[in-house]
Image (spheres, rainbow, N blue to C red):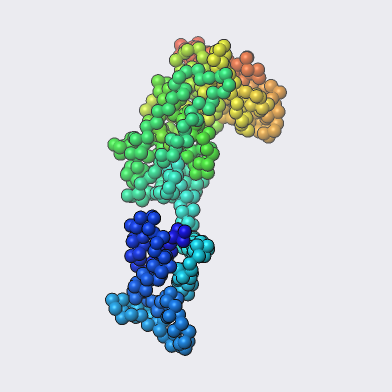
Amino acid sequence: GSCTFTLPLYSLASVCIRRPLPVASHLIATPRSRRCSIPPSAALRRELLIAINSFQHAAYIKAMVDPQSLTHRHKQSPSKSRKDLETVDSGNNASDSSEHKGKTRPHRKRLCFLITGAIRSESRWAYLASFLGISAVLLAVSTFAALPAMEAMRIAGRLRPPSSTAPVVRPRVLVASDPWRARKVKRKRLKLELGRRVYHHSRADHQNLKGNLHHFEKDNCVAIRPWQLEHHPTCNSMHEVTISEMKGDAELVNGGDYRDVWRVWDYDMETPRAFKSMRFDRHSEGHRVYEMMRNEAVAMEHLTKSKYVGSVHGFCALSAMYEFSSGGTFKKAAKKGLLSSKQKLELALQVAKATRDVHDMYDEGVVTITVADISSGQFVQNDKTGIYQLMDLNVLHFMTWDKDTHELCMFEGAPNAGYVRSPEEYSRAKGFDENIDIWAMGNVLHYLITGEYGFCVEDYSRPKVLEKVKKGELPPSYDDIEKGGDPIEIEILHVVKNTRATKKKDRWPAKRAVEYLEEVWRKVESGEIKPNVGGGYHKVAESKS
């Protein structure tokens, strides 16, 4: 009965007397059937009276516990009682008593009132009420005391280091400046604190992937190839990567919608790597993001053979390690008209080959991957080969087909609001396929020629661009290229027209675009097609302006 609440009261009473009570261990060692044979209140009185001599307010508690002391206390004058309260037994704790003499803490006295009141009570309900009251007081005190620590954790959680996910138990270890602030500048060197571990991922990350690997398979539409369903994380090697040990610093070089890109150093301290970590404001999006990053890692592993797609060197949960390239993109050179017509043809061929490899790497006649985010900023020059590689595949879609008829299934996706999207995306079609990549590839080729996407040369507003694209209108820049452009640029424009057809069935596949551009390249090399000496489209545009 009333023994149920005895042990918690023992521990609380120990707070008042500053030492554990022997009776508590005695009751723990006593068989359950014999525990209630000892009256809990009498036992507590007995043990408290033995232990109170070590407490600075011993006389005070003794008066509350011992009825005779309580009666005696009422007979004393207030001044004399106050003096007795400050007088402690001059035993082993005499020095402690003199140190705290006259410094009675009201909150401790009130807590001891509750404890001793519960001890004196013989009712089980009084025990329960007292215990709940004491627990509420302790909870309030501990919460108030923990506020500074909670605030520190909240702040530390906002300052995210190069790390993919926050550990479940502890917040991320702060090792670098705030990436959010660093994103506002073009390049910023981040000095790391040596000796601090960077936790890239937690065990819970892999739990989030369980049962969610095949989410793109719906109804009768299944994966086309078994490798689309695979998951090969290299978490052991990824956990060995500690940025604080890699040359002492890391550099935030870029960032996208989902992840930040850091330059780190490999174990030889000479080879740079691109480490991508999740942006802290994207970390709460759930299983969908885990599946996106898995798709990218699996796809890039599948595309290792292609020299037009970037290489992945490690993957775990939301973090990944890629080949680092410092060459940058061709956007600035194309926009300023710094590319020759032959260079434009070479880059157009690389863009088309990257799209072809992603769609059908091994020429099996079936599209297995759709990038769904091809743009000029996604191609980065490889330092060793000089080839511009497609480096970002984190919003790709694995294609599926009907398990009975083997016809390709459409996938669902939210239409993008940019200038490089296809008419079906702007029209909010019910499903998409690889043709959205073909349209986007044509936009990249148009960018190589003019330095702008379709309709952006004329500086139309976004609503007008969307309306013109949905109607199937051709950009006015087509006429300018045909009239004053270079012969090579006109050949590239021919590919642009056939990949930007309004109807999906009229668009060239990436393989055909590659074949046509390779034929143009052969003619340029043989001298059948010669570039203009005076320049191409940009020279005409400059003369008009």
Query: How far across and down, in percent of the image, does residue 361 sit?
Result: 46, 17
Which residue shows up at 66% across the image and 19% down it?
502
Residue located at (35% from left, 46% from top)? 197
Residues 76 and 481: in front is 76
> Residue 194 appears at what percent x and percent y?
33, 49
Image quadrant holding the C terminus, namely top right
> Is residue 209 visible in this depiction of the protein?
yes
For image coordinates 37% across by 74% down, the residue present is: 49
From the viewer's perspective, is 180 left or right of 470? left
Viewer-proximal residue among 304 and 59: 59
Query: Residue 386's spot in the image, x, y percent?
Result: 41, 26
| Residue 442 in view of the camera | no
Total labels: the figure holds: 0
In percent of width and height, residue 310 lies at: 43, 27
- In the image, 460 versus 27, the foreground residue is 27
Q: Can you tell which quarter of the image residue 508 is in?
A: top right
* Quadrant in the rendering for residue 328: top left
Residue at image position (45%, 36%) is 207
- The correct choice, above or below, for 129 with respect to 187 in the image is below
